């Protein structure tokens, strides 16, 4: 069975005990944070190896390494073949810094995008800009609906139906 399927079956099991799932995710987030702390120390250095080698390097179980690879995949310069990945699959953690920061913001992972390791990478102003760019990209703006008896937005003073709404 591919590692990703095994990880997702375990991490997103709807029939599992909620307390066990909460513990699993709590343990995972703690390990995930430690991996990000390490890779952000040298953000331009490509960390590469088999899934098993990287799990050992970062002190993770194969499950947690798979979860980490699943989570970071959208932030990588070249996505890994996570769907078919096995423990001997060679993967890379070469990430796009801006994409990674914004994806952390999108995930609401403040324990990751507020890591002190970001400070030498981006100054406070840049981090704020990236944060706001990501947040505003998720905001859905709904245009105001104009009804026939509303004043026409062209400023004529006429009702919309008598001015620009004639095609109704």
Image: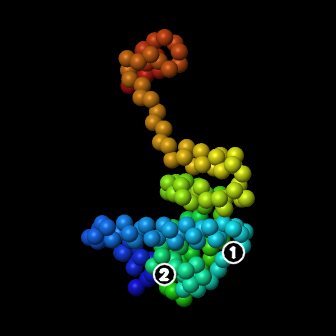
Q: Which part of the image, by quadrant, shows the N terminus?
A: bottom left
Q: Which residue corresponds to the image point at 66% horizontal and 66% vertical from the top-left?
A: 40
Q: Residue 128 or 9: which is nearer the viewer? A: 128
**Res 165 quadrant in image:** top left
Q: Residue 80 or 27: which is nearer the viewer? A: 27
The reply to whether residue 72 is in sight is no
Q: Which residue is mark 2?
A: 61
Q: Which residue corresponds to the image point at 48% horizontal and 76% vertical from the top-left?
A: 64
C-beta proximity under 8 Å, tags 2 and 1: no
The residues tagged by marks 2 and 1 sit, at their Cα atoms, a distance apart of 21 Å
Mark 1 neighbour density, 10 Å: few (under 14) some (14–19) many (20 or more): few
Element type at mark 1: loop
Q: Find residue 122 and report its horizontal and vertical position in percent.
A: 71, 55
Give the mark toward the camera: 2 or 1: 2
Q: Which residue is mark 1?
A: 46
Q: Which part of the image, by quadrant, shows the C terminus?
A: top left
Q: Residue 166 or 153: which is nearer the viewer? A: 153
Element type at mark 2: loop
- Image mark for residue 133: none
Q: Find residue 104 and report its horizontal and vertical position in percent.
A: 55, 58
Q: Find residue 39 and report its horizontal and vertical position in percent.
A: 65, 70
Tell me if residue 131 comes above or below residue 83 in the rendering: above
**Res 35 quadrant in image:** bottom right
Tell me if residue 144 comes above or below residue 13 in the rendering: above
Q: Which residue corresponds to the image point at 53% horizontal and 55% vertical from the top-left?
A: 110
């Amino acid at each position: 069975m591919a590692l990703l399927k095994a990880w997702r079956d375990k991490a997103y099991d709807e029939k599992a005990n909620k307390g066990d799932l909460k513990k699993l995710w709590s343990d995972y987030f703690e390990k995930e944070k430690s991996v990000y702390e390490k890779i952000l120390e040298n953000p331009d250095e490509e960390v590469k190896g088999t899934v098993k080698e990287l799990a050992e390097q970062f002190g993770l179980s194969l499950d947690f390494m798979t979860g980490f690879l699943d989570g970071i995949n959208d932030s990588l310069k070249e996505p890994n073949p996570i769907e078919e990945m096995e423990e001997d699959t060679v993967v890379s953690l070469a990430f796009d810094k801006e994409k990674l920061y914004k994806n952390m913001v999108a995930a609401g992972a403040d324990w990751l995008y507020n890591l002190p390791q970001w400070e030498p990478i981006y100054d406070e102003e840049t981090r704020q800009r990236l944060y706001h760019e990501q947040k505003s990209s998720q905001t859905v703006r709904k245009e105001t609906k104009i009804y026939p008896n509303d004043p026409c937005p062209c400023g004529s003073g006429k009702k919309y139906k008598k001015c620009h709404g004639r095609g109704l």
